[in-house]
Image (cartoon, grey):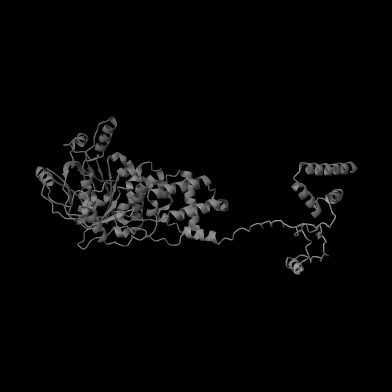
């Protein structure tokens, strides 16, 4: 059995966390500047010392000091003297730095497929209809063997589904173009927040966060979140994804002497703000069941009311720093926080919460039988590592000496949905273009003799051989083949516009069938359209109009 972990101290002795019950989850709450970061540092290093890997998000940049041994500064000595505490054995903890943007640590990536439509919809802030369309896109991609690895894959798949929505309607249901557009716009916003660097390969292997060093101490994985916090949906969705990864990949282990891993979720209210009901249910499920995987989850936030009651009821280990009650709402929050502790007859919990100083807290850990201890007031111990951030050079040296140095630095872009869909589009034959009209010859038209291979052309096209015409003749195809290639009829010498009108009139007086115009009639109409003078147009309309009236009277 592992020895208890001292976290705080008071006149009655040390307040300790039992390692075998550390997977029962917990929370660290308190107003800004009351000492939550130091408490987090003490808890993380105590767990690391007994061989438990730890993950934590460094929101303010202060937690990087875990990688360097602390020192007895004048301020620290004065505090230890006032509280009557012994000086700790100064030591650094084994750390690994991570960063979604790849700037202050090893890059962290996940694939679109692994993230899944539910958490991606949360990140994109989609409504129910848009989330349904996104689920259909994932389903279509799975059914067609399309890999969704990064955001450009998802955009290409969305475009493909939108363009072929009619084809997918029968099997998958209606796919709204408006929903496709909303998802596309959301992806653009996520890319601007760093999603284009977070989504991709190589994807994080969760086992790389569960390492120990040569001396058996658990590695503390520190995620740089000072910049990531500006993208709260990306931040909260990433941490929820990591919890899901732990839940899905770790085997059931039951109760152990110590956790397999401890997970600290700083700024936890971002996880629950505007979270839809299905997502809250998923968080509650993970928190309830991940205990059996040997993982302890600790939420760090300003007020315990930031955490839903269904989740707060699962948090057995509690550290409450000071809360300020300046408004009626704050006073209600203090009273509600006090009621979540097991009452101590010798302590007014609600009053104590407002009187706590910096580094002082109300502590209630689980006892050997899994019951909450009565709340105690005490002072958080001084961490053995440095309080405050590392320098850039110190951080770079630790990154270079990390166990996973060089594993995730180079991004991989293998063939996936984007490349396959774009390649398929490139292989499709280009649509046939209409032949360009040839410019009219500058000289007067000459009779066109039949080419030597004209009959051969006709035979190859499945048509009857064309008759050979004498010089100066006009070729008029039979009326049964109106769509055969035509040549402009050639007029013999001496022919004039009157003859054309005569021929046109003959066509008008001819059969009343609905066949297409003869070539001669078509040429007359074309000639009429090309006449530029008003006199010519009136002449044509007058002649043809009188002929039409005459024909009507005869019929």
Residue 518 seen from this side: no
Along the horizontal axis of the image, is 139 left or right of 98?
right
Residue located at (74% from left, 48% from top)? 530
Q: Which of 495 and 163 is in front in this view?
A: 495
Q: Nearer the viewer, residue 420 or 491?
A: 491
Quadrant of the rendered image containing residue 451: bottom right
Residue 150 in sight = yes
Q: How many numbered markers are drawn?
A: 0
Query: Would you place residue 349 above or below residue 179 in this image?
Result: above
Name the quarter where the C terminus is drawn: top right
User: Which image quarter holds the N terminus?
Assistant: bottom left
In the rendering, at what x and y percent does residue 534 appear? 76, 41
- In the rendering, at what x and y percent does residue 299 appear? 28, 46
Q: Which residue lies furthest to the right in this view?
A: 554
In this view, the residue in front, 369 or 394, is 394
Of 417 and 546, nearer the camera is: 546
In the rendered view, tell whether residue 210 sits above or below residue 319.
below
Q: Which of the 4 quarters of the picture holds residue 9? A: top left
Residue 140 percent across, percent down from the top left: 50, 55
Q: Residue shown at 53%/48% (left/top)?
A: 175
Task: Report x, y in % for residue 94.
Answer: 22, 57
Spot the residue most to the top: 328
């Amino acid at each position: 059995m592992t020895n208890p972990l001292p976290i705080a101290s008071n006149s009655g002795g040390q307040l300790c966390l039992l390692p075998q019950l550390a997977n029962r989850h917990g929370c660290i709450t308190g107003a800004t500047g009351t000492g939550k970061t130091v408490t987090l540092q003490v808890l993380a290093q105590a767990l690391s010392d007994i061989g438990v890997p730890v993950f934590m998000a460094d929101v303010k940049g202060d937690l990087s000091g875990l990688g360097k041994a602390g020192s007895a500064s004048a301020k620290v000595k004065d505090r230890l003297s006032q509280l009557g505490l012994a000086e700790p054995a100064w030591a650094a903890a084994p750390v690994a730095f991570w960063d979604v943007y790849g700037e202050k640590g090893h890059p962290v990536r996940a694939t679109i497929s692994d993230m899944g439509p539910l958490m991606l919809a949360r990140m994109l802030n989609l409504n129910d209809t848009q989330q349904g369309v996104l689920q259909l896109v994932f389903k279509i991609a799975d059914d067609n063997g399309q890999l969704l690895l990064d955001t450009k894959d998802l955009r290409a798949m969305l475009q493909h589904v939108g363009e072929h929505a009619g084809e997918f309607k029968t099997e998958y249901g209606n796919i709204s173009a408006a929903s496709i557009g909303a998802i596309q716009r959301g992806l653009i916003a996520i890319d601007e927040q760093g999603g284009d660097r977070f989504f991709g390969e190589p994807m994080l292997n969760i086992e790389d966060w569960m390492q120990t060093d040569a001396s058996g101490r658990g590695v503390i994985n520190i995620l740089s979140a000072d910049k990531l916090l500006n993208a709260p949906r990306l931040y909260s969705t990433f941490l929820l994804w990591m919890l899901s990864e732990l839940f899905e990949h770790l085997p059931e282990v039951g109760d152990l002497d110590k956790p397999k891993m401890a997970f600290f979720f700083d700024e936890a209210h971002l996880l629950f703000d505007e979270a839809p009901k299905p997502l809250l249910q998923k968080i509650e499920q993970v928190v309830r069941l991940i205990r059996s995987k040997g993982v302890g989850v600790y939420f760090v936030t300003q007020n315990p009311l930031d955490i839903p009651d269904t989740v707060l009821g699962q948090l057995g280990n509690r550290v409450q720093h000071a809360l300020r009650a300046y408004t009626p709402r704050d006073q209600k929050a203090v009273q509600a926080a006090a009621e979540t502790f097991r009452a101590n007859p010798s302590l007014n919990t609600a009053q104590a919460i407002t009187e706590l100083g910096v580094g002082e807290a109300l502590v209630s850990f689980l006892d050997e039988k899994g019951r909450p201890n009565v709340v105690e007031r005490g002072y958080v111990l001084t961490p053995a590592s440095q309080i405050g951030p590392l320098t850039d050079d110190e951080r770079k040296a630790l990154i270079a000496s990390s166990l996973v140095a060089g594993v995730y630095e180079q991004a991989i872009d293998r063939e996936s949905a984007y490349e396959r869909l774009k390649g398929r589009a490139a292989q499709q034959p280009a649509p046939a273009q209409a032949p360009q009209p040839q410019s009219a010859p500058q000289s007067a038209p000459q009779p066109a003799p039949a080419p030597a291979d004209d009959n051969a052309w006709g035979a190859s096209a499945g048509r009857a051989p064309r008759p050979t015409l004498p010089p100066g003749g006009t070729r008029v195809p039979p009326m049964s083949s109106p769509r055969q290639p035509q040549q402009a009829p050639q007029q013999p010498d001496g022919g004039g516009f009157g003859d054309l009108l005569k021929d046109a009139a003959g066509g008008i007086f001819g059969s009343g069938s609905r066949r297409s115009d003869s070539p001669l009639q078509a040429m007359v109409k074309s000639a009429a359209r090309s006449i530029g003078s008003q006199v010519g147009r009136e002449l044509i309309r007058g002649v043809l109009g009188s002929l039409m009236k005459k024909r009507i009277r005869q019929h």
